[in-house]
Image: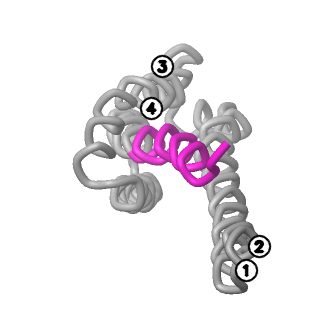
Amino acid sequence: MGSRDFNMISYEDKMKEKELSLHSFIIAIACLVVQLLSVGSMLSVSVFYIEFMDYFRDSASSTAWINSVCIGTTFLTGPIASTLVNRFGVRSVVIVGALFITTGFILSIFAKTLTMLYFSYGLLTGIGNGFSFGPSIIYVGLSFKK
């Protein structure tokens, strides 16, 4: 009875392991969706590049700054996002990032000048992408044991 009971794993322990692994895979899928949306939003803006040049009647270099500001802001906010993750947790930082992205997209709809688009899409969406991009990578690593 002694050594046999010691090596047996209870049904509850097996269920906890299954729940943890299922939970880990759900987190991985959710983080994949976050990655697709944040990186996809940055890379898909180039589709509107010529339309932006026609609408704002500005040069190619001025129009290209819209996405450059967004990408630059995304990666410059990485250290800030990791500091906030240590203080508030991954979920909170990603939710705040989603709010920044949503605000940036909504304000971009009403942009009448390139300067407004630099602010709304470039800065706000860039900050939101930075707050969601890095922490979602961190969260996948934390959710798996190996």
Relative to residue 42, is residue 81 drawn left or right? left
The image shows residue 110 at horizontal and vertical percentages of: 40, 58
Give amino acid for label 4.
Thr
The residue drawn where x is 33% and y is 45% is: 85
The amino acid marked with disc number 1 is Met
Helix, strand or loop for disc 3: helix
Position of 65 relative to 46 (above/below): above
Mark 2 or mark 3, whichever is nearer to me: 2
Residue that mark 4 sits on? 74
Q: What residue is at 65 percent from the left and 85 percent from the top? A: 12
Q: Say few, some or many: other residues with alpha carbon within 10 Å of mark 2 (under 14 / 14 to 19 / 20 or more).
A: few
Please name which of the two marks, 4 or 1, marks the residue nearer to the observer: 1
Task: Check residue 62 in the rendering and tell me which mark sits there, or answer none.
Answer: 3
Q: Nearer the viewer, mark 4 or mark 3?
A: 4
Q: Secondary structure at mark 1?
A: loop
Q: Which mark is residue 4?
A: 2
For marks 1 and 2, give the CA distance.
6 Å
The residue mark sitting in front, 2 or 4, is 2
The spot of residue 30 in percent (x, y) is: 64, 62
Q: Secondary structure at mark 2?
A: helix
The three-letter amino acid code for the residue at tag 3 is Ser
Residue 1, numbered circle: 1
Contact? badges 1 and 2 (CB < 8 Å): yes
Label pair 4/3, CB-CB below 8 angstroms: no
Q: Assess whether residue 136 is covered by the magenta stretch.
A: yes
User: Disc 2 versus disc 3: distance between alpha carbons?
Assistant: 73 Å
- Mark 1 packing: few (<14 Cα in 10 Å), some, or many (20+)? few
Stretch in magenta: 128-146
In terms of sequence position, does the residue under pointer 4 or pointer 3 come before the other? 3
Front in this rendered view, residue 80 or 17: 17
